[in-house]
Image: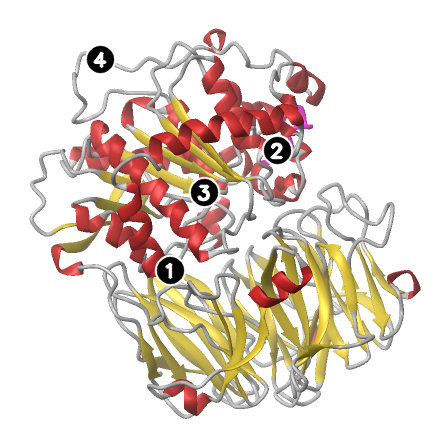
Amino acid sequence: MRRLILSAALPALMLGACSTMPGAQDPTEVSVPVSQASMPNFPADLTPAGVAAADDHLALEQVDGAEAMAFVARSNERALATLEGDPRYEPFRQQAEAILTATDRIPAPSFLGEGIGNFWQDATNPKGLWRRTTLESYASGNTEWETLLDIDALARAEGKDWVFKGASCLPPAETRCLINLSDGGKDAVVVREFDLTTKAFVEGGFVLPEGKHRISWLDAETLLVATDFGPGTLTESGYPYIVKALKRGQTLAQATEVYRGEAGDGGYGVSASVFRDGEGAVQAVIFNRPLDTFRSERWLWENGTASRLALPERVTIHGVLGTDAGADLVFSVEESWERLGRRYEAGTLLAMAPRLLGADENPINIDDPVAFVPTSRQSISDVAVMDDNLIVAYDENVVGQVVRLRHEHQTGWARETIDVDSNSAIGLGDSSKKSGRIFVSSQGFLSPPSLGLLEADRSAPRTLRAAPPKFDASTHRVEQYEATSADGTKVPYFVVMPRDLAMDGTAPTILFGYGGFQISFPPAYKPEMGKLWLENGGVFVQANIRGGGEFGPGWHQAALNENRQRAFDDFAAVAEDLIARGITSPRHLGIYGRSNGGVLTSVSITQHPELFNAAVIESPLIDMLRYHELPAGASWIGEYGDPRIPEEAAWIADYSAYQRLSPEVDYPRVYITTNTRDDRVHPGHARKFAARLEAQGHDHLYFEDTAGGHSNDADPVANARRWARHYVYLAQQLMD
């Protein structure tokens, strides 16, 4: 089992000088840029020591520190009284819970041996059931499920707050699986071997203690493991840089080292990928050594020896195509690349034999390796590598398309368009090389998800499931507009608005953005948003700003490092365009972002407080001058830059919201929220921002859930409470 698709509610993740805005309340009230002198906590010295010396809330970085937990308790009491005490809260909570635990959701499928696997959560089993069925039963209207592992029962039996974080099963039979269990929802997991035949954990099987592991099956008796092997084996981000072969019965200390990066490596840690054909035979083992967030070295492991592949540092490997000795490695380049006498532009999808990626730079005659070249308004969103073809999902102007590609030695790459829903987000789910099948999903802002099965001999998916609507979509319509950013770049955005919108600036509007890590946000069905916001007359806007992947690597790289301001400018431009069109006004415009989106929303509030009257800042990065000091933070240096380098600290300080807060500015009342057990984005970011707002006398709300991690996947019932609080706050700020 490799991946699950179609969650019931797609969780949303992760600005220049102020100016007079079209539609502002008073054209004489011109915003004035805030001077550095009015920022009492802006460090005079941007070295790490100087930044720390200027920080009066460092104690809040101690996750379970006494001062920190007292702050959390006091803040939570006020936030819950304000939000859960609102008469709208309980109806919102009930509606959200009904959506998130509904039994008519599409069960997200994965291929599991000869059948179909699924992980399911509902009101009866909030922690979830891992279960399986046959394809025939799944496609029927009355699926019969066999429970493999009951996470609720396991948690009760062991007295642990277990959260299921997926399973990895050994092909081709896939009866032996590695189960990932998180205590409370953290990224760090405990790993246990599980037998699907007996439906029990394997006595004497593979067991790994809690950690941020990178594990792949090599064979039934061997795992390739990157983990914490003891002192000195983790990078400064807390990720592993050593891979060992772990034999059944061995301890981690007894495992044999097979690859080593360096302690100073960046990114998310070294890992081993084992690529197989449809019968489960190993085709290639490749080690990924991250140099930073996006740059990596790739090493081919053959006969016990690793040799570096001559690939660009920015590359995504999708799999191995073919079943014989001439099988090709399939990858897309994220930067321009010259190899063997040819130049390939960023975004190109290629297929080359590993022998062509060795040290030899002499041009040779090869079949055309170019499988797909996106246009300037296209980007590849996913690639499924089968034994004899590629299934490529791509976005064109942020709308999904799918093609099948086959390579013919005489004629090159044959392209077949796959018939999918128009004006939708198209997702590739799990695939089976053995059967040549792949799951394909479709959804839109107003169109519930549907799930199809694409088979090797078909040009369109066969519909398996269609989710029923969870809100009345008849009252709204979807439009796509463009805003012009500060440097002239056209930035697309979607608006979901009432059909009879008056265009008088009074519509309560949520503007969502992310703008980072080459993550795209196409149209998606958000049932809790539709029920709690659209049905109450609200407008939802999704901005496809730079930093994302909507238009390929260039769209992402345009907002990296010293160019981060472009993402904030894009977001502000969309806000301005909404106001200029009369869709909304600053009084009724709020913003929402989480994770990297928390950088965006916190910066937006500090750079353009005149544009917004609400901001949900969730699980955020905010103190960007210290983000590298907090767990996992240094892994993102490739995205934001390194605050330890003076030049880079200077451009980060230009926008870091925590340091740029001013008591002289009238900020809207913001809502900051995070999780105590978030081991990806440290809760200290959110805590310190709230504490500084408080110290400067700014009204705000802060809530920290003491359970759950970054993904908010621990409990759908708890997640319903989270969404209810969000929308109560937004209604208070934008509708009341």
Quadrant in which residue 647 is drawn: top right
Residue that mark 1 sits on: 100
Near-viewer residue (733 or 414): 733
Disc 3 secondary structure class: strand
**Mark 4, other Cα within 10 Å: few <14 / some 14–19 / many ≥20:** few
| Amino acid at the residue labelled 3 | Arg
- Is 115 drawn above or below residue 520 in the view shown? below
Residue to which mark 4 is pinned: 29
- Give the number of the mark in front: 3 or 1: 1
Residue at image mark 3:
594
Q: Nearer the viewer, mark 4 or mark 1?
A: 1
Identify the amino acid type marked 4: Glu
Q: Amino acid at mark 2?
A: Tyr
3 or 2: tag closer to the N-terminus: 3
Of mark 3 and mark 1, the one earlier in the sequence is 1
In the image, the segment drawn in magenta is 641-648
Compare marks 4 and 1 and give the one earlier in the sequence.
Answer: 4
**Is 647 inside the magenta-drawn segment?**
yes
Q: Nearer the viewer, mark 3 or mark 2?
A: 3
| Residue at the spot 32% in from the left edge and 44% down from the top edge | 491
Viewer-nearest residue: 252 or 423: 252
